[in-house]
Amino acid sequence: MKPQEQAKHWIERYSFILDTETTGLEDDAEACEISIITTEGEVLFDEIIKPSKPIGRTAMGIHGIRNMDIKDKAGIEAHADVLRAFLENQTIVVYNAAYDKRIIENTFKAAGLEPPKNVTWQCAMLAYAEWRGVRNPRRRGWRWHKLTDAMEHHGLAFSGMEHRALPDAKATLQLMKLMAGGSSLSCLINEKPRVHAAGLEGERSPEPTSAIDETPPLPPQAPPPEQDKILGYPKWEWAIAAIILFGILIFILAG
């Protein structure tokens, strides 16, 4: 299935979109924030989760969630049933699905819980990579792009601070609509969004690929007419000076 068809399929079948923020990048990292939204933008779940381990400094520097922010929060045990209800037997779209799938499983297992079953994980990052169509010279296939890079490339804005679960989930939805050929993206803004990194490969493209972002240039305006001057002074000042001098000359001659 082509990326455009895939994105349409995700949206039409009412898939859910998930994003997590984590304790770190290690293999056993856990979630410290989980958000789930629908493809209509409805927020189903958005909670900071207390993991079984502290948040690492590197992770804190990315998402800004501190250990003091999670000390009084509930662990995954308090949210497990709700999360299972949203995830099990559902299609879940994630930007980098393999990573978030592992994070969800780690978080449940660290608490001695069975992870959600029968989840169909779908990766928006891989679909977007193919849709954008930049070849990766280091390996066969398409170049992957960080979410912040993808948003910046198309002039799209995060609905909050990037690298937080809910704004990232909403950003994934924007890219899905873009790939599906949608023409109404409510989060477009004129100013350039904040971006922490250009992309996994440092790739840059000088022109956006989305026609949605293109704004017709304003027609050129004629420059304002310059004031007539003589030796740097306006003509009317010279005229007044001439009248005064002429009056003085008449006065002298008459005397």
Image (spheres, rainbow, N blue to C red):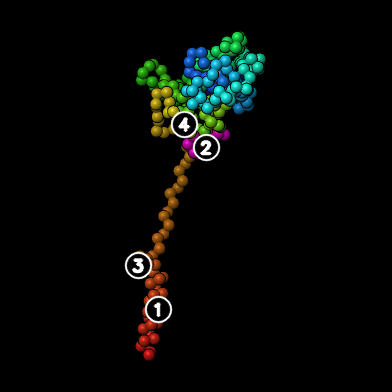
Q: Main secondary structure of the magenta part?
A: loop
* Mark closer to the chain start, 2 or 1: 2
The residue to which callout 3 is attached is 230
Numbered label attached to residue 31 = none
Magenta span: 184-193
Which of labels 2 and 1 is toward the front? Answer: 1
| 220 w.r.t. 133: above or below | below
The residue to which callout 1 is attached is 244
Is residue 191 one of those drawn in magenta? Answer: yes
Spot occupied by residue 247 in the image (x, y as percentages of width and height): 40, 82
- Label 4 and label 2: CA atoms lie apart by 14 Å
- Label 4 and label 1: CA atoms lie apart by 66 Å
Q: Where does the C terminus fall, quadrant-wise?
A: bottom left
* Mark closer to the chain start, 4 or 1: 4
| Residue type, numbered disc 1 | Ile
Residue appearing at x 53%, y 31% in the figure: 161
Residue appearing at x 61%, y 16% in the figure: 76
Residue appearing at x 49%, y 38% in the figure: 191
| Residue type, numbered disc 3 | Ile
Looking at the rendered structure, the secondary structure element under dot 2 is loop
Please tell me which residue lies in front, 19 or 189: 19
The residue to which callout 2 is attached is 189
Spot occupied by residue 70 in the image (x, y as percentages of width and height): 59, 22
Residue appearing at x 54%, y 25% in the figure: 66
- Label 2 and label 1: CA atoms lie apart by 60 Å
